[in-house]
Image (cartoon, rainbow, N blue to C red):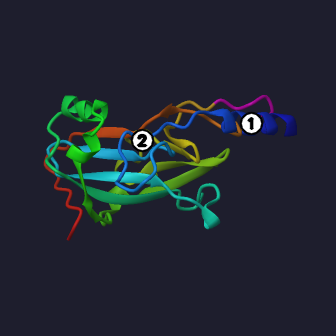
Amino acid sequence: RRRRAEVVEREAELRPTLASPWSAPGEADGGPADLFLFIKDYSWCLRYRIARGPGDEGMDTERPLDMEWVKLRRPIRSQRELIASTTSTRGHDRLFDWSIREEPRHHGFFYQVTEAVGSGVEAVINFLRGRGPSLLVQPSGISLALANRQADADGDAPAEESGTPVTHCWVEVGGLPFFPVP
């Protein structure tokens, strides 16, 4: 069992970090990916950022994600428009107004940590609880958690999981206003 944990830790160290397609001016590129939640025809984007633990070492496993609304220069109307901005070398300049940021206030955009998983945690965004995917938050980035968990030969949950890395998601909402400021 100890040998398996050492192998899993080594694999986690070797796992590539997915870089975010967007970063605020003055932030280093190439770090662990943020998750950006885009809402169709909405002029704000919600950014979930991996929170560092005390002393900037590792990840804060109790509150693994920092959150902030970032103002968009204009609402995004389609997924095609969003994807076009990720392929542009200056897409973040045209997409975001980084000078305008707000803290989220609506409980639905907050998240709950559901369990520890290896060097990270599984978390679910409150709006998606019971209806959508969970997130696997690790120091190397954010992934969609695997839907089916396989126990190891001893019947224990795996020490580490990997899911599909994710940097942004597209949401279409009917009839619900989401205002980042009161």
For marks 1 and 2, the one nearer the N-term is 1
Mark 1 closeness class: few <14, some 14–19, many ≥20 residues within 10 Å: few
Instruction: Locate residue 17: give its quadrant.
Output: top right
Dot 2: element = loop
Residue 109 painted magenta: no
Q: Indicate the quadrant containing the C terminus: top left, top right, bottom left or bottom right.
A: bottom left
Indicate left or right for 66 with 10 as reference. Answer: left
Residue 118, x across and y down, in percent: 67, 44
The foreground one among 34 and 90 is 90
Nearer the viewer's eye, disc 1 or disc 2?
Answer: 2
Residue at mark 2: 20
> Left or right of 138: which side holds 18?
left
Residue 52 in picture, x, y percent from top left: 56, 59
Q: Residue at x 17, y 52 (%)?
A: 43
Q: Is residue 7 left or right of residue 93?
A: right
Q: In this rendering, is residue 138 above or below 79?
A: below
Q: Name the quadrant containing residue 68.
A: bottom left
For badge 2, the amino acid type reads Ser
Residue 169 lies, in percent from the top left, at 33, 39
> Residue 10 has which mark?
1
Q: State the extent of the magenta-drawn residues as a range.
A: 150-155
User: Residue 180 at x, y = what percent?
Assistant: 24, 62
At x 74%, y 30%, the residue is 152
Q: CB under 8 Å between callouts 1 and 2?
A: no
Label 1 is placed on what type of residue?
Arg
Q: CA distance from mark 1 to mark 2?
A: 23 Å
* Label 2 CA crowd tier, 10 Å (few <14, some 14–19, many 20+): some
Q: Is residue 152 magenta?
A: yes
